[in-house]
Image (cartoon, rainbow, N blue to C red):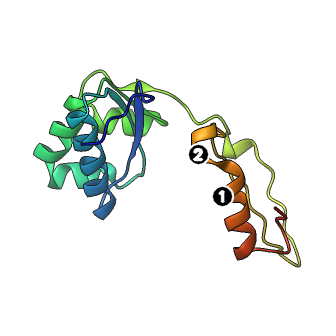
Amino acid sequence: MPSTPGIQVAHVDVFSGPAFFWCEAACAALRLCGKPYALTLHGGNLPVFASQHPKRVRRLLETARTVTTPSPYLRKEMALYRRDLKLLPNAVELVKCEYRARAAVQPSMVWLRAFHKNLQPHARRRRFSNVCPKRISP
């Protein structure tokens, strides 16, 4: 396993279906590196998936330092698999967002990225400008 000296803790989003496997794989890699991690549960179908795969779900949730849910619904439904789930609501309350009907929809993008020197943000920006040259200039 490669060394991970700059990583102190990780965060993994947990979804159901085939994506759950990737959560398991990421967490297994983190455990091999000796890194603690937090999980955030997502998706209304996760409780159904958990009922079909209770051992897998329980095993994953038990290995995390902490587990959060964005909704009271997920907290209640997933408490069977781990009791100390923490409710951490989404920062944006969609019910308070106004719907705007538009005649013409224009694509837009929000790209959130950590700009640490090791990540070479300028190189990534140049590479992305080849994909979308009209929007991003290097």
Whether residue 81 appears in this view of the structure is no
Q: Position of residue 114 (x, y in %)?
A: 63, 40
Task: Tell me the residue that label 2 is attached to.
Answer: 119
Q: Position of residue 97 (x, y in %)?
A: 77, 47
Q: Amino acid at mark 1?
A: Arg
Q: Secondary structure at mark 2?
A: helix
Q: Is residue 76 left or right of residue 96?
A: left
- The image position of residue 53, as x and y in percent, is 15, 52
Assign the N terminus to one quadrant of the image: top left
Residue 20 % position (x, y)? 29, 54
* Residue displayed at 75% across by 42% down: 96
- Asked whether residue 31 is in view, the answer is yes
Q: Residue at x 45, y 29 (%)?
A: 6
- Closest to the observer, 85 or 34: 34
What residue sits right under mark 1 in the picture? 124
Residue at 22% of width from left, 42% of height from top? Answer: 28
Q: CA distance from mark 1 to mark 2?
A: 8 Å
Determine the image quadrant of residue 17.
Answer: bottom left
